[in-house]
Image (spheres, rainbow, N blue to C red):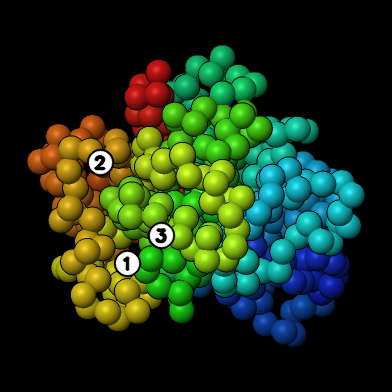
Amino acid sequence: MFTKNNTFDQIMHTSPIGRAIGNLFPTCWLERIPKEHYGHTMSQIEKEDRMEWGVPFISDSFLECTNLLMDTACSQRFGFVPLWTEGHPSAAFDPARTPDSRIPDADTNCAEGVWLFTANPDTDPAAFAHMPASGSVPPYPSTAVSISEREQASARPAVILCPGGGYEMLSAYSEGIQLAQRMERDGGYKAFVLNYRITPNYYPLPQMDLALAVMHVRAYAKWYRIDPNRVLIVGASAGGHLCASEALLQEDLKKEALAELHRRNLTQAAAAYADCSARPDGIGLLYPVISFLSEYHEGSCQNLTGQDDNLREKLSVERHITAAYPPVYAFSNEDDGAVPVSNTRRLNEALDKAGVTHLCEVFPSGDHGVGLGYQCSCKEWSEHMLAFFARLFQ
């Protein structure tokens, strides 16, 4: 296990960390460490270097991700399950595979790099819940879900987590790993973190990746020990747009995903997913991008549309919601300087008009990209979401 007494160089030169850290911890965050500090311990770096948003370098988060990668390489507790491929997901956890081969290279931004990071249901189905990290533990008692529901061994609800990053990068730790810990430990979910394609891949590829992920967990629900009728998708920022738009366009996306599987001669996978719906049973949205028409996040719009203006109206979710749309929980912060809070307000209006079950909240402060947001006014958003879906999924 790495600690703060290890130097950055020692950690990054330990296989497979150097080539794989970006799967769980954004490599752009590592750019905050200047080269002259590579020989320093993580304890020193925490004192010397700061994140872009002004806090000390998040050494604890970095170490958590490196140790999680080492755990994945050396045991079968976690695994990266590729989606655009044939075969049973248990192959990702095969003990006969070499440790290094179980970890994909980071930033492989193509179909072969699309995967779900999840716990092995044959060894520890809720391994995220059993991680020793404390950063995802709320500063209040979590009572939204009963203890019996949290500790159920099978037929858990599933949650597919879609990190944000403007369709340009993926914030897989704070908007993926930490949410997985929270939802498995305090909500009784089986969590999956999705690595989807980003720019220069544009619509419909990221949405097809999520549609395929929804179909995948349903196709293998028995093995994953989840309830195929309780599949939740949760996304932050651009990941929120990914979830909201996939739910809107899921029928067409399923057809396109199955057609792409056939084009790739992945006929067994196409057959496995043919009878599986790509419609989620619920959607959770953290400070989401919703519209591409007014007061929108320009980077997300450009990266997803490939600057094809004809897609902007199609991918403005609030314009197309009907009564058939899945139930929604969403929140934003009033002072969000990246994605205007009007996105969530317009979503709320559209859901109201269509008669869709929902809870949309706006908190006074916290800005953008806060993840669980325990230090902000939105600190209880995840408790509210867990309670909202607990009532719906009963």
Q: Residue furthest left?
A: 353
On residue 338, the disc is 1
Q: Residues within 10 Å of mark 2 (few under 14, many from 20)?
A: many
Residue in view at x 45 percent, y 60 percent: 259
- Name the quadrant containing residue 56: bottom right
Residue 198 visible: yes
Residue 54 visible: no
Which of the two discs, 3 and 2, labels the residue nearer the N terminus?
A: 3
Q: Do tag 1 and tag 3 residues touch (Cβ < 8 Å)?
A: no
The disc labelled 3 sits on which kind of residue? Answer: Glu
On residue 376, the disc is none
Image position, residue 215 (x, y; %): 49, 44
What residue does disc 2 label?
Answer: 325
- Name the quadrant containing residue 370: bottom left
Q: Residues within 10 Å of mark 3 (few under 14, many from 20)?
A: some
Q: Do tag 2 and tag 1 residues touch (Cβ < 8 Å)?
A: no
Image position, residue 28 (x, y; %): 58, 74
Image position, residue 18 (x, y; %): 77, 71
From this view, report whether residue 380 is shown above or below residue 5.
above
Q: Quadrant of the C terminus?
A: top left
Residue in view at x 13 percent, y 40 percent: 354
Residue in view at x 56 percent, y 23 percent: 155
Q: Nearer the viewer, mark 3 or mark 2?
A: 3
What residue does disc 3 label?
Answer: 256
The disc labelled 1 sits on which kind of residue? Answer: Ala
Residue in view at x 74 percent, y 50 percent: 92
Q: Residues within 10 Å of mark 1 (few under 14, many from 20)?
A: some
Q: Nearer the viewer, residue 163 or 208?
A: 208
From this view, report whether residue 199 is shown above or below residue 151.
below
